[in-house]
Image (tube, helix red, strand yellow):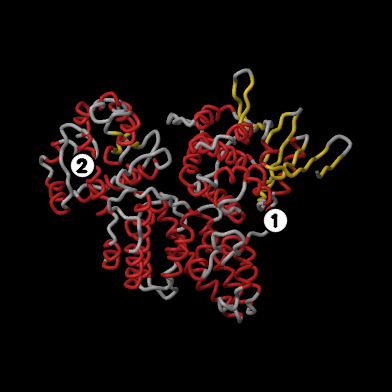
């Protein structure tokens, strides 16, 4: 323990494991500190860091007690003001809130997997009960209903909620999507033990708000520390001998960094990582215990040191090459990164697939997209390459979704590294040939097999299925001559759309075809039995029998309307689309098991056309 004393005050600093920090301890947050602002990016980075550190030590077949000797992970510090025995968080609530969400997620996963021995232990880190009332260890009253729902594994109300509560619900959904699937099976109890016992924070406790905020301001004084980007800038400029060249390179660097920061926090750092990985990373850490970090990993953690250590490989020998590295290379790749990030935020027709990939939080796309670009590329050539690679990634992502495979950063990192390395510097024709070959050799396709024949909705893929249905719906309408409404269809929440089950949740109405409720539920969730409709529609008509609500589908999107014969009347654009594509569209007067099977085949056919590898060739010609 570190302890500083004065006649009336003391400041304590103590390293604590997650168990020591949260077990039986309550934390409050003052009203002016209550916003939880972490986005998917920050959560994904934390989960990837934890998972990668755990994998460094874990091997299949280890005894549970071997976890005690696994490597440790330092998560930073939190600052607490202790006011009459009640602890108020001054700094660190973003991490503590996220850790609480992670613990709730792990507790629920242990329950699902049957590994229930640790559930009580985790519960003590999340909440406590007294006189029949549960209170959370991170105690913020406005969050309680949301936290209760997450803890119980229940759906969260879509009613208007404060920003923090909405972010908490969204980050939990991201956890369900992003948590590595290989850690949810036999490795799960090991990961839980490791997280609780081998992940550490420093808890700094002051006994007055003034002292707590003084510590906070001191630790966050940005004038005392440099970012990796600032250190790289200093190293490069210091090696430019000519004063005029140095000043010019400095102006280029400052201008590009400011443009990136205008996009968002840390975008300058992410841009440099994507650039260096795309053009220079030739190795990556293998997924085995004791494996050493490769270029890809080192660029991600300390690229300023990596550049200095690889200066000969990078051609940084004489002063003029350091200037070139900034004025030509950094300027070129950072401008394209900036354009790609903007395309990921707002749909633009020339880079539409970048937007679709970004909606799945596929941040790995940026170094892969930059990989084939060369500084001699014209804008037209660079755009053509970017469209080809973005279309390839779009196909890979959706094929994997259809085959129940994760697209999380940790799962896809190695494969994307290989793609990036293989396509580096290729021209459009060679790029298409390389990526078509990779698609042809992949196991995940839309062809029916034992794994994907029943593809549909489950508890952890709702966002992906929603976006997939939005793409299908938009494809049918735009190919039938209508305007695109994808952005509207992809919007979830209070004012957006939600997944509609064609069958209401009443097994008793389907007993003649399903012997058990679980069999009915599994079939009901198949994608052929789903639509996307405005949330208000589901609230008004969702519980109706199909024969009564199908008339209401006529006024909705064309994919929903296609269940009714009126969709085929006086709609030449739709009929032409059907004739040209040979898809088995048909109205359904009733919707029984064979009707759902028919729609399942229809949706699979739609997926094959939307994510047809021939799209890559089309991008070369566009």
Mark 2 packing: few (<14 Cα in 10 Å), some, or many (20+)?
A: some
Q: Pointer 1: what residue?
A: 223
Looking at the image, residue 531 lies above or below residue 347? above
Residue 130 lies, in percent from the top left, at 64, 21
Which mark sits nearer the N-terminus, 2 or 1? Answer: 1
- Residue 52 appears in the rendering: yes
Q: Residue at x 46, y 51 (%)?
A: 408
Residue 473, x across and y down, in percent: 26, 44
- Of the residues tagged 2 and 1, which is closer to the observer? 2
**Residue at 64%, 65% in the rendered image:** 231
Quarter holding residue 552:
top left
- Residue 279 left/right relative to 402: right
Q: Is residue 31 visible?
A: no
In front here: 610 or 387?
Answer: 610
Quarter of the picture containing the C terminus is bottom left
Q: CA distance from mark 2 to mark 1?
A: 64 Å
Say whether marks 2 and 1 touch (CB < 8 Å).
Answer: no
Secondary element at tag 2: helix
Q: Is residue 29 above or below residue 356?
A: above
User: Residue tagged by mark 2?
Assistant: 598
Residue at x 57%, y 42% (from the top left corner): 189
């Amino acid at each position: 323990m570190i302890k500083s004393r004065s006649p009336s005050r003391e400041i304590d600093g103590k390293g604590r494991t997650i168990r020591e920090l949260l077990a039986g301890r309550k934390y409050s947050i003052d009203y002016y500190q209550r916003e939880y602002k972490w986005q998917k990016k920050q959560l994904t980075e934390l989960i990837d860091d934890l998972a990668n550190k755990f994998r460094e030590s874990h091997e299949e077949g280890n005894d549970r007690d071997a976890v005690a000797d696994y490597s440790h992970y330092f998560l930073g510090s939190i600052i607490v003001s202790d006011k009459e025995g009640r602890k108020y968080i001054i700094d660190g609530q973003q991490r503590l809130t996220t850790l609480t969400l992670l613990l709730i997620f792990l507790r629920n996963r242990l329950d699902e997997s049957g590994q229930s021995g640790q559930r009580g232990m985790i519960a003590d880190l999340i909440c406590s009960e007294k006189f029949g009332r549960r209170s959370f260890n991170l105690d913020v009253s406005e969050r309680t209903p949301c936290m209760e729902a997450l803890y119980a594994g229940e759906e969260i109300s879509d009613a208007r909620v404060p920003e923090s509560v909405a972010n908490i619900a969204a980050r939990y959904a991201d956890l369900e999507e992003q948590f590595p699937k290989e850690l949810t099976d036999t490795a799960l109890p090991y990961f839980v033990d490791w997280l609780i016992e081998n992940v550490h924070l420093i808890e700094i406790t002051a006994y007055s708000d003034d002292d707590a905020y003084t510590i906070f301001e001191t630790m966050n004084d940005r004038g005392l520390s440099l970012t990796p980007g600032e250190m790289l800038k200093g190293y490069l400029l210091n090696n430019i001998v000519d004063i005029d060249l140095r000043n010019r390179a400095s102006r280029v660097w400052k201008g590009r960094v400011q443009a990136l920061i205008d996009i968002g926090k840390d975008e300058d750092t992410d841009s440099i990582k994507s650039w260096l990985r795309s053009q220079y990373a030739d190795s990556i850490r293998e997924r085995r215990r004791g494996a050493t970090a490769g270029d890809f990993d080192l660029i991600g953690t300390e690229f300023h040191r990596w550049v200095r250590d690889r200066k000969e490989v990078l051609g940084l020998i004489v002063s003029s090459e350091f200037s070139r590295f900034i004025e030509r290379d950094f300027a070129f790749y950072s401008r394209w990164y900036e354009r790609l990030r903007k395309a990921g935020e707002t749909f633009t027709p020339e880079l539409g697939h970048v937007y679709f990939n970004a909606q799945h939080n596929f941040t790995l796309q940026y170094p892969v997209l930059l990989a084939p670009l060369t500084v001699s590329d014209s804008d037209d050539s660079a755009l053509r390459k970017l469209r080809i690679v973005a279309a390839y990634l779009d196909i890979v992502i959706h094929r994997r979704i259809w085959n129940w495979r994760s697209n999380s950063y940790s799962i896809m990192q190695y494969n994307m590294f290989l793609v990036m390395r293989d396509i580096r510097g290729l021209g459009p024709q060679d790029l298409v040939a390389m990526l078509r070959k990779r698609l042809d050799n992949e196991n995940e396709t839309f062809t029916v097999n034992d794994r994907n024949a029943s593809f549909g909705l489950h508890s952890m893929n709702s966002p992906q299925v929603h976006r997939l249905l939005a793409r299908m719906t938009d494809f049918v309408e735009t190919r039938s001559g209508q305007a695109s409404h994808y952005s509207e269809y992809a919007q979830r929440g209070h004012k957006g759309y939600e997944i509609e089950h064609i069958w209401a949740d009443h097994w008793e109405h389907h007993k003649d075809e399903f012997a058990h409720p679980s069999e009915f539920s599994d079939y009901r969730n198949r994608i052929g039995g789903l639509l996307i409709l405005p949330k208000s529609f589901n609230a008004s008509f969702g519980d109706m029998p199909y024969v009564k609500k199908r008339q209401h589908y006529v006024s909705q999107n064309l994919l929903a309307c296609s269940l009714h014969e009126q969709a085929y009347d006086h709609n030449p654009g739709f009929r032409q689309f059907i004739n040209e594509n040979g898809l088995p569209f048909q109205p359904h007067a009733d919707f029984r098991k064979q009707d759902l099977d028919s729609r399942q085949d229809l949706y699979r056919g739609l997926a094959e056309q939307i994510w047809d590898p021939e799209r890559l060739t089309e991008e070369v010609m566009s």
